[in-house]
Image (cartoon, rainbow, N blue to C red):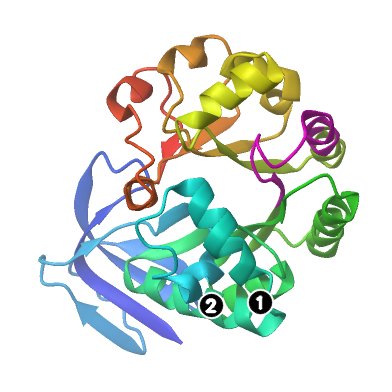
Amino acid sequence: MSVLLKNVLACDGGMERARYMSVLVEDGRIASIGDPETSLTADEVVDGKGKIGLLPGFVNTHTHAAMSLLRGIGEEAPLMEWLKEKIWPAEAKLKREHVYWGTYLALLEMASNGITAFGDMYFFMDAVVEASLEMGMKCGVSRGIVGPEKWKLDEGLQLADAWKGREEFVTVQLAPHAPYTVPLPFLKEIVDAAKDRDLGLHFHFLEAEWETGYIRDEMKMTPAGYLNASGMPGARQSVLAHCVWLDPKVIDEVDFSRMTIAHNPNSNQKLGSGMMDLVNMMGKTKKIAL
């Protein structure tokens, strides 16, 4: 199957300049790029007439896709009340088929909005991968680790082993959930495992204001000290989700060269968590995604 997108205004991944061109796609891959009024033919021709824009696919960097099934549960509740009283009890009842269909629904919505890749932290991750591959979506998947149970880490490592060498559409990360759900010694063990396997990490960090007090009072650390103590900056790649209450100055105290902040404005406002200092954060690091 081939499709010719003719006379479209296209941007490259840098999104810095656009030009008119034609793009030939064969079997889901870009086969040729040519002049707007090209003589190329295809099974299907879409003539943009210079009025259709063509952009690279968007990447949704932090998701729990199957939670599409849990929308409307725990409305108007702050983060910990929402998790403890509503979400965690509901998730305890979910089976593999729920995660598959919840993910499939979320991916349909993502695809309709131009998203072609996503990073997901959840459980029954084989179901997430199955739905993703059926949709033709690229995914970075990680088995969420809540608590000190090592078997959850083992599941994450088994997932990585299962998809090793097949990274074109599926990559695997390790996902300690958050500072308040994973003890620091176990977090260090997870980070060490990621380094040993050359895997990335996916982690919630400073989503709610009280977390800064938790790190200060319970761990006797600053946020920068916590990140450095975890060893996370030395891992292959880390995604820090939310970071609503991360002081941009922390970036001066931590090596952020292999760390990406996942900005989640909708989620942050739904839970009343606050607003990340995006402008000043971007003055410190360009590695910020949605």
Q: Position of residue 62 (x, y in %)?
A: 51, 51
Return the mark for residue 254: none
Return the mark for residue 94: 1
Which residue is at 77% across, 47% downward? 147
Q: Position of residue 72 (x, y in %)?
A: 39, 70
Q: Nearer the viewer, residue 199 or 177?
A: 177
Label 2 crowd (10 A; few <14 / some 14-19 / many >=20) = many
Which residue is at 28% across, 25% downward? 279
- Is any atom of residue 257 visible in this view? no
Q: Nearer the viewer, residue 136 or 124?
A: 124
Q: Nearer the viewer, residue 57 or 202?
A: 202
Label 1 crowd (10 A; few <14 / some 14-19 / many >=20) = some
> Residue 33, relative to residue 254: is it above or below?
below
CB under 8 Å between callouts 1 and 2? yes
**Foreground disc of the pair 1, 2:** 1
Return the mark for residue 102: 2
Per the image, label 2 sits on a secondary structure element best described as helix
Q: What is the span of residues highlighted in magenta in the rendered image?
A: 173-191
Which residue is at 32% across, 29% downward? 278
> Residue 188, relative to residue 247: is it above or below?
below
- Gap between marks 1 and 2 measured at Cα: 10 Å
Which residue is at 23% across, 42% downward? 17
| Amino acid type, callout 2 | Gly
